[in-house]
Amino acid sequence: MSDLVIYIVIAVAVVALGVAVWFGLVAGRRGRDVTAPPEPSTVEAPEAPAEEAAPAAPVLERPAPAAGRLERLRARLARSQSTLGRGLLAVLSRDRLDESTWEEIENALLTADVGVAPTQELVDQLRSRLRVEGGSADPAVAQTALREELVRLADPTMDRSLGVEGAHGQPGVVLVVGVNGTGKTTLVARIARMLVAEDKSVLLGAADTFRAAAVEQLATWGQRVGVETVRGPEGGDPASVGFDTVKRGIDEGIDTVLVDTAGRLHTKAGLMDELGKVKRVIEKQAPITEVLLVIDATTGQNGLTQARVFAEVVDVTGIALTKLDGTAKGGIVIQVQRELGVPVKLVGLGEGADDMAPFEPETFVDALLGD
């Protein structure tokens, strides 16, 4: 009996242990079941690179048309020049024109850099006309006579058209020369603007290789109106830049090529010889249709000396007078034309991008006299 009890107790204990183990397993499984499964690890895909916006096309400037520019700037020119005109008219309006009066007129004209020969010619013509027409008694007659004689000296018969067109499908080639500080680079840019306003294609050549600032200045001016600039290495051969520019102009069917050159003193033979080389090398590609000499109008007689030397070296075909609004010596227009037989074709009248205009003798004289 005791053995039976023992077996029963052992059996109950085994069953109880089994039940306990079973409940433990079930409870553990249930505990794991109610625990939220860990979120699956995710690797974020790299963001697709945003498409780069295309750079906005630069807004190109539309330059003012060349026609009428001098008229628009006439008031500015008159402010700087009319002192001479008013002085001459005041003297001519006197009741009596004696020798001392004519000496005053001569001195005024010489001070304005009209030149000795043109001054003497003008005075002689005026004296003859006023004796016949009675100008000493009528200021209006004197003013008319003075205007007509000044216009005649400025010679409106000269061909002032700018040689910007080539022949046989080649581009017009304009070579711009002059001494340091006359404003050559700015003038080249202004001519480019004028041509763009006339719907011509233009290519710039930065042959002033000794001044990096000049190259950058020219390129910047060109970008503003959509004109490209050919440049070479700093300190490189300017003739090579001129050659490459004209070659590219021919290849691309450009209407006009403008070549800016380094400023050089007219007294330096070596630099002047180099300028002659630039011209010769360019002409291996195409004929130069215009050699434009830039003269600072404020330099007076010195500008005339420069003109003579440059004319000997590169066969100048036209004159551009800059800073004409900054001097009362506008008579240099008359004198330089007489000395060289070369017309003044362009005048600069300020610092603005479009402050350049074709030279018109009648408008110039009217500004001189303050009309």
Image (cartoon, rainbow, N blue to C red):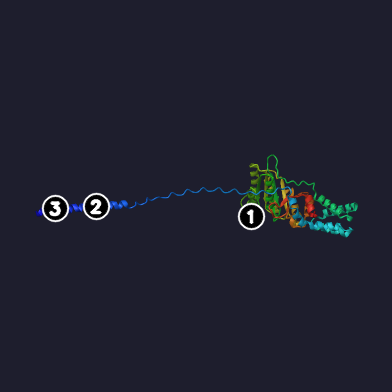
User: Which label sits on residue 23?
Assistant: 2
Can residue 268 be seen? Answer: no
Camera-nearest residue between 75 and 82: 75
| Residue 1 image offset from top left, x and y in percent | 9, 53
Image side of residue 54 versus residue 93, left or right: left
**Residue under numbered circle 3:** 8
Can residue 5 be seen? Answer: yes
Q: Alpha carbon of mark 3 to alpha carbon of mark 2: how far? A: 22 Å
Answer with mark 1 or mark 2, whichever residue precedes in sequence: 2
Camera-nearest residue between 270 and 181: 181
| Residue 299 image offset from top left, x and y in percent | 74, 57
Label 3 crowd bin: few (<14), some (14–19), many (20+), radius 10 Å: few
| Residue 286 image offset from top left, x and y in percent | 68, 43
Query: Would you say the residues marked 3 and 2 are in contact, meaning their CB atoms lie under 8 Å apart?
Result: no
What is the secondary structure assignment of the residue under circle 1?
helix
Find residue 87 and report its image quarter: bottom right
Image side of residue 318 versus residue 142, left or right: left
What is the secondary structure assignment of the residue under circle 3?
helix
Answer with mark 3 or mark 1, whichever residue precedes in sequence: 3
Q: Alpha carbon of mark 3 to alpha carbon of mark 1: how far? A: 114 Å
Image side of residue 223 versus residue 296, left or right: left
Type of residue at label 1? Ala
